[in-house]
Amino acid sequence: MYNFVVKSRVNDYSVSFIDSTYETLKAEIKIGDYIIIDNNIIKLYPNIFDKILTETKFIAINATEPQKSYEGIIPIIRQLIETGFKKNNRLIAIGGGITQDVTAFISSILYRGVPWIFFPTTLLAQGDSCIGSKTSINFGDFKNQVGGFYPPSSIYIDLNFLDTLKEMDLKSGLGEMCHYFIVSSEEDFRWYKKEYPKALREKEILTQMISRSLAIKKSYIEIDEYDQKERQVFNYGHSFGHAIESLTQYRIPHGIAVSYGMDMANYISVKLGFIHKEIRQEIKELLEQIWAGTSLTDISLEKFKSALSKDKKNVGNELRLILNKGYGKIFKEALQMDEKFTLWMDEYFTNVLK
């Protein structure tokens, strides 16, 4: 019902919603394939993986930010080469966004490109990052600074993996997905806001949200796969969000950081006269539900400005922020981090975060 194909300049790829990872994986694996899997997934789902991993070559990784770096991927590439992995073999990623990034990046550079398949196990990956072709690894303390575009050949979404996620991880996924609904239209956002509480409890509602989130993203990436123009609106909330992630050493999960980031973008949009404060408040009512239970009081304005200045989307001394002119009217704006911008952010840190 929800299955679809994404068109890509590299290779078109299918997205399939499945009920049994075990059966799908058994049917998919070929001789010579290599599984790259999150250690936590092995521990959580022995009934799926104990038998499969005794019959298939695999590399288990700790899905942490240090793993997603040049230093972190060197042992993986070495093991693949030394144990006979060939260009015609495939990598199969099983895990969340970090496992995806590690596998996609290695697939894109090993032997100048090998095919890969993805079984996303987090809501963040299922509802967002699994499509779009982006590969990213970190460089030192700087998040997602190195990468390219290299899609999998197939994606298999099994919502049963979400049963073991903590509520904070579900909220993180929903926070990331939220920006697609604001980018899309007022109708999409109002539906999302209304159904958000149910999505935390009802799998069918969550499936609908994932499907719609991916459909919105698909409509943009098929016209701007390499993130040169139209697709850049999906950075809404992300410049601020990435700064929050790095300054909290990832204590604040990605989608929740992006939720704060969207409100910051809306706050600046109000100050610039792009939207009325009522629109910001309507969106903030939902975002507050997502970030409830977290705090940013340990972040200083000066450190935040420094982190924001290092965002990879900046050009020269200009911030390239994604701001809001209304539902379905998200756009890119160049701003100087001048005295006026600093004053607005100081107001935000003083009045909203404290």
Image (cartoon, rainbow, N blue to C red):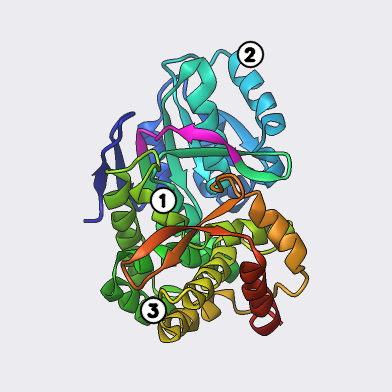
Across and down, in percent, residue 74 comes to 68, 25
Say which element carries label 3.
Answer: helix
- First-in-chain label (1 vs 3): 3
Q: Residue at x 63, y 13 (%)?
A: 82
Q: Quadrant of the C terminus?
A: bottom right
Say which element carries label 2.
Answer: helix
The secondary structure making up most of the magenta span is strand
How many numbered marks does the figure carry?
Answer: 3
Residue 82: assigned label: 2
Q: Can residue 50 be seen in this view?
A: no
- The foreground one among 192 and 258 is 258
The amino acid sitting under disc 1 is: Gln
- The foreground one among 162 and 239 is 239
- First-in-chain label (3 vs 2): 2
- The foreground one among 21 and 194 is 194
Nearest to viewer (mark 2 / mark 1): 1
- First-in-chain label (2 vs 1): 2
Q: What stretch is highlighted in magenta?
A: 145-154
Where is mark 1, residue-wise?
232
Judge from the rendering whether residue 299 lies leftward or rightward of residue 179; answer left or right: right
